[in-house]
Image: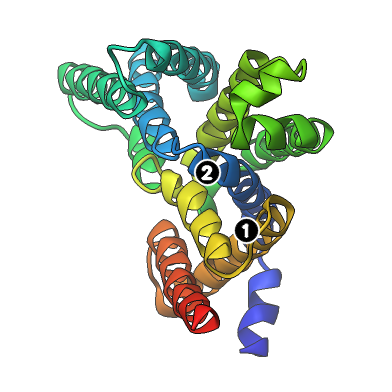
Amino acid sequence: MFDTLKLLFSYDFIVRAMIAGGLVALCCALLGVSLVLKRFSMIGDGLSHVGFGALSVAAVMNVAPLAIAVPVVIVAAFFILKLGKDSKVQSDSAIALVSSVAIAIGVTVTSLSGGLNTDVYSYMFGSILAMSRTDVYISVALSVAVLVLFLVFYHKIFAITFDSDFAKATGVKAEFYNMLIAVLTALTIVVGMRIMGTMLISSLIIFPALSAGAVVKGFRKVVIISGIVSVVCFFAGLYSSYSFNLPVGASIVLANFVVFSILMLVGKLKRK
């Protein structure tokens, strides 16, 4: 095992993947706690599908993927929140609506352009081990920005997570902080798509929060445990992928599922 770890750290591209992926996993976990508690966890899935549509358009236009994906996914996050506030459209329906339209656009554009190219394919299924230095720098910069903003506004995020109406009554600008969470989630999703792929990135938001919630109570404890679980599962998945020649994204999701199953069992035993 230690020989394998030593070998892993000897490759620059794997070290880059560890740095970028570890930060993205941490961001997903922190935001995931708030999203899961607000019953808005599927926004990650919806935004990742929007990302696929945006990347397909970027590939056809032959422009930098992130230059199109970042603004489009952020606008989609705003739109989902606005649509979800309409009494006639529930939040889950808003996510499904935007998600299905985005996939339809992505598939149509891809079909008209002659099929999937390498760039779109790598974003669909993840290509963490092929990340360039530029990809890593962008991932690290965006991830650090998300972490700093989350920590700075931690108490406000805590307030709107549990009772948005009460937070409003105490003077907290609930709509602003809901939008902030949406923007941070959008940025994390866009960065994470390169690592996990559009098909699997939402699992990094959902699994750690559910795993932590199974064994501890209290927002701060759940946030801390969620972050630890997410980072540990990321490295476990990366190690498994290298050791058994498995897809990285799928290995990370399976590691999260195993930990979730174990912690759910531990939680049930604690309550007996």
Residue 2 position by quadrant? bottom right
Q: Which mark is residue 226?
A: 1
Q: Residue 234's spot in the image, x, y percent?
A: 56, 63
Q: Is residue 202 above or below residue 172?
A: below
Q: Nearer the viewer, residue 271 or 137?
A: 271
Badge 2 crowding class, 10 Å Cα cut-off, few under 14, some 14 to 19, many 20 or more, is some
Q: Nearer the viewer, residue 252 or 165?
A: 165
Q: Is residue 75 above or below residue 246?
A: above
Q: Residue 202's spot in the image, x, y percent?
A: 43, 44
Specify the amino acid type for callout 2: Leu
Q: Nearer the viewer, residue 101 or 250?
A: 101
Residue 51 position by quadrant? top left
Residue at x 43%, y 16% (from the top left corner): 76
Residue at x 79%, y 30% (from the top left corner): 153
Q: Residue 127, can we see it? A: no
Q: Which mark is residue 177?
A: none
Q: By what rule are the colours in the image chosen? A: rainbow
> Which mark's residue is nearer the viewer, 1 or 2?
2
Quadrant, the N terminus: bottom right
Q: Which residue is mark 2?
A: 37
Residue 174 position by quadrant? top right
Tag 2's secondary structure?
helix
Measured Cα–Cα span from mark 1 to mark 2: 13 Å
Tag 1's secondary structure?
helix
Specify the amino acid type for callout 1: Ser
Q: Residue 118, can we see it? A: yes
